[in-house]
Image (tube, helix red, strand yellow):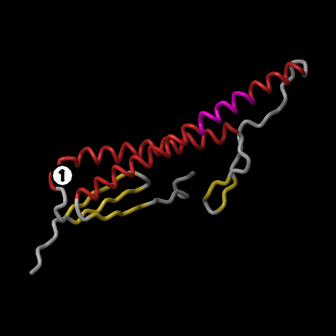
Amino acid sequence: MSEQEYTSSVDVYEFNNVNQLFDFLDNEIKRRKAVLGDIIRDIERLKTLSEAAVKLEQIFAEIAGGQRTATRQTTSAAKLNGVEVYINPEPLSETRLLTSIARGLQTSIASLEKVRKALSPLSKLGDIDLNIRLIIENGTVKAVVIKVPSPPI
């Protein structure tokens, strides 16, 4: 995807105290790890299918007297409004796509874990009222803004 086609995703979350922030981070890390686990299982399944397809092709080549049959190893995606659409993708193409997604998730998880660890000393504040804003861009934490609310006048 070229940089011109790339659109940024920004999510802003607001919390009233550090406990809410930490609960969110812990749950989000857990959720993303579960998704990553599912993707890794799919990648392993697709690798098995790819290997089986290569073996089958080799067997057919032997049957055909050593001539390899032409096979399609990758599937091209149709682009619809900037979205790649795959129809019956070959296992290798789907593996590449899922591997790219898994890398992005790993980066995202690492970002959330780093922020959680860096902010852990704030756990001493517990339920003290604060205005906390967490800004996540493309799955990566970009900023955490913490403000102490002004006392009423």
Residue drawn at the location 82% of the way across and 22% of the way down: 59
Residue 48 sits inside the magenta stretch: yes
The foreground one among 27 and 152 is 27
| Residue 139 on image: x %, y % | 42, 52
Q: Is residue 97 left or right of residue 113?
A: right
| Residue 82 on image: x %, y % | 60, 59
| Residue 31 on image: x %, y % | 44, 49
Residue at the far right: name it.
64
Looking at the rendered structure, the kind of residue marked 1 is: Leu
Residue 81 sits inside the magenta stretch: no
Q: Is residue 64 left or right of residue 3?
A: right
Q: Is residue 36 above or below residue 130?
A: above
- Write down the quadrant of residue 136 in the picture: bottom left
Residue hosting label 1: 122
Residues shaded magenta: 42-53
Q: Is residue 107 above or below residue 137?
A: above
| Residue 126 on image: x %, y % | 18, 56
Q: Secondary structure at mark 1?
A: helix
Image quarter where the C terminus lies is bottom left
Q: Residues within 10 Å of mark 1 (few under 14, many from 20)?
A: few
Residue drawn at the location 38% of the way across and 47% of the way down: 29
Residue drawn at the location 19% of the way across and 51% of the way down: 123
Residue drawn at the location 15% of the way across and 55% of the way down: 125
Residue at the far left: name it.
153
- Write down the quadrant of residue 73 in the picture: top right
Q: Main secondary structure of the magenta part?
A: helix
